[in-house]
Image (cartoon, rainbow, N blue to C red):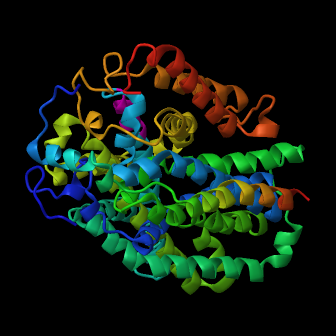
Amino acid sequence: MSEEPIQSDDTVDESAWPLLQSERSWGQFELWVVLLVAASATWCYIIGEYVGYYLNMKMGAAAMIAGSMIGMFLVTLAVVPSATRYGIDSISSSKPQFGNKGWVITVFLQYTSIIGWNSLLLIFFGLSVAQFLTTTGITAEGSGVWVVPVATAVACLGVYLVLLKGASGVERVTKILFLFIVGVGVWMIYMLLTNESEALAAAKPAYASGSLLWDYTTGLEIGIVSLLSWWPYIGAMVRESPNAHTATLPSMLGMGLPVPILSIIGLAAILALETSDPSAWLVELGGPVYGSIALLFVIAANFGTAVIGVYASAIGLKHIPAIGKMPWKVALLLGLVPVAFVGIVIQDWFFNNFGTFLAFIGVTFAPLVAIQIVDYYLLRNQRLDIRAMYDNSPGSSYAYWAGFNPAALAAMVAGFFTYIYLLDPLTYESNFPYEYMTAALPTAVVGGVVYLIVTKLVVQPAKLGGY
Amino acid sequence: MAETTLPPELERRISELEDPANQGDGFTGADWVWLWVLGVIGPVLLLIWGWV
């Protein structure tokens, strides 16, 4: 990576500026490692647990893998071609659609969703450290009251120190974690499937609705929406590779497949053992040593994902002119301090409101990816104006009206209400034709069609948007 | 047309990337096959397998 100063002492991979071909050194293996480590985290057990409420092992696994791969397909189509063509992150890739001021919407979505996920991961990191210390006899029962916040603070410090090295810090730490995460993940799946095969075959989902089709669709929906959440992460990673070909399989198999595969652990555990927490059921299967290995897995996996999440959000924040002028180490703090605050000070409040918060964040990514796909493939013939992406003036091709593109705004609103009509993400009450189509896919279609129509009828006739 | 004066280093980067020869290539034919197999056809087959 170039060591050329960009702003203050920052390197180019610590800025939101585009990377040149000569600076994009990650091949398929490096990208595969980074994306796999990003994908492997505690959320996999939660996803598997949710699906296990509705579906048995076979149907749950099929729905989760299918949904995840569909979600990853949409995210890959939306971000990878533009990110690898111009060396840009997810936020830059959204500027042609949202406008040279409207992109703050996507920064908000990225920042809030990554902070939410990182808070969850680092809280689980702290809980796992506390449990590990108790299991190994280093600390007494009940010490979690002080161990959890201290461990969360130490994790934040660790993330900060790793990311002072920018993308090379990400690459180094993921290479260290990669083998451990893959090895223990495969081992946990093996342990569950071999030791609990009979219980799995007989297990019934606890909250099945009575409609097998509805349950199956809901499993698929959970898979799709979970993987759409990769939109904020993926651009900052794949821009380190030289072309779309290098990023295709790492994206689909490195980032898309590990989530449902690891989620099978949560699915199987909730069905057979009625707990998705691997540290609990591995203690049951093999005693404290097995439990400790599981806890180390959670600690390593969550740390790796948090590193990548903070990196992606700091790159996104660098687009904001005032933050873009700040040193990288300050931008990192803007991504980390809210996480530390949530994890240490308002942990209980966060847990109580986490579902509500992320549900509404999640529904925005379906129309977002559809807008980008329609714009890039149908309207712009796979070419963007790289200069306009970094030109915040009213004369920019992407200035639209006062910096905002009404087509994107209309598409986001239409998509949001389509989703809410089809499936209330808080109560899971649904309306026809949810059980036949999911909520995310029609939402994406509506968002994309509205974007196309408004662009054709309003934006292009006004000769705006650089079409 | 653009009105903003960009920082010299950013200007250099953009000028270089405006040349298609310096841009990354898009998906190849094989990539599209993989994308459709892994993102559409495979999931459909999996859903059928899970249902029957």
Residue A325 lies, in percent from the top left, at: 13, 42
**Quick one: A22 or A233, which is closer to the camera?**
A22
Which quarter of the rendering shows the N terminus of chain A? bottom left
Identify which residue is drawn at 30% across, 63% down.
Answer: A24
**Is residue A381 left or right of A272 when viewed as pictured?**
left
Identify which residue is drawn at 35% across, 16% down.
Answer: A401
Residue A420 lies, in percent from the top left, at: 65, 28
Q: Is residue A391 magenta?
A: no
Identify which residue is drawn at 19% across, 35% down.
Answer: A321
**Is residue A355 left or right of A442 when viewed as pictured?**
left
Identify which residue is drawn at 36% across, 32% down.
Answer: A103
User: How many circles with numbers are drawn on the protein?
Assistant: 0
**Quick one: B31 or A207, which is closer to the camera?**
B31
Task: Indicate whether B10 appears above or below A297.
Answer: above
Q: Is residue A407 visible?
A: yes
Which quarter of the rendering shows the C terminus of chain A? top left
Q: Is residue A60 visible?
A: no
Residue A57: which quarter of the image?
bottom right
- Magenta stretch in the rendered image: A102-109
Task: Indicate whether A5 appears above or below A442.
Answer: below
Residue A442 lies, in percent from the top left, at: 69, 34
**Is residue A18 left or right of A261 when viewed as pictured?**
left
**Quick one: A303 or A394, which is closer to the camera?**
A394
Residue A85 lies, in percent from the top left, at: 38, 52
Residue A130: which quarter of the image?
bottom left
- What secondary structure is the magenta-colored segment mainly? helix
Task: Indicate whether B38 appears above or below A77.
Answer: below
**Is residue A407 left or right of A227 when viewed as pictured?**
left
